[in-house]
Amino acid sequence: MSDDVKVRYSDADLAEFKTIILAKIEKAKADAELLKSAYMNDHDNGTEDTSPTFKAFDEGSQTMSKERNMQLAQRQEKFIRDLKNALARIENKTYGVCRVLGKLIAKERLKLVPHATLSIEAKNLQK
């Protein structure tokens, strides 16, 4: 064996991580769809027959709610992109390798944050 062999997870480990990531992508897509439909269909709460003061308050509240749902949907889309990037790293067998230290990221961390590209040590160095 030569010294230039790269540190990486085994194919079996990568397959296990792939299963976890695919499940997270499916859930994230479903959550994103719920959020999108929430802000798309958030225009009628049946307040047309209530007092003008309440209606104005409710419309302000609806706007804030709609913006919040939009922000959450955008975060969900970014999460999905990050997970898809993790799948690409699995395919090229660089998944789970810290991009700063070049060491393996702990399996426990990857199971909790499957799109992580930094080990805890590298993350702490950024603080």
Image (cartoon, rainbow, N blue to C red):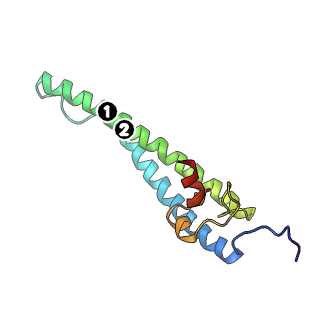
Q: Residue at x 21, y 30 (%)?
A: 58
Q: Amino acid at mark 2?
A: Arg
The amino acid beneath tag 1 is Met
Secondary structure beneath dot 1 equals helix
In percent of the image, x 67 and y 77: which residue is there? 12
Looking at the image, the residue that sits furthest to the right is 2
Which percent across, then down, holds residue 97? Answer: 68, 62
**Closer to us: 3 or 25:** 3
Q: Disc 2 on helix, strand or loop?
A: helix
Q: Quadrant of the N terminus?
A: bottom right
The answer to which image quadrant residue 52 occupies is top left
Percent across and percent down for residue 110 are 56, 65
Residue at the location (57% across, 71% down)? 107
Does residue 109 appear left or right of residue 66 in this picture?
A: right
Q: Based on the displayed image, in which of its 4 quarters is residue 68 positioned?
A: top left
Image position of 3 (left or right of 58): right
Residue toward you, 63 or 44: 63
Observer able to see residue 43: no
User: In this orientation, which residue lies closer to the viewer: 29 or 49?
Assistant: 29
Residue 69 at what x, y percent from top left? Answer: 38, 40
Distance between mark 1 and mark 2 Cα atoms: 6 Å
Q: Residues within 10 Å of mark 1 (few under 14, many from 20)?
A: few
Residue for badge 1: 64
Residue 10 appears in the picture as rendered: yes
> Are the residues tagged 1 and 2 within 8 Å (C-beta)?
yes
Residue 100 image label: none
Q: Which residue in the structure is indicated by mark 2?
A: 68
Q: Residue at x 27, y 34 (%)?
A: 44
* 57 with respect to 9 (left or right): left
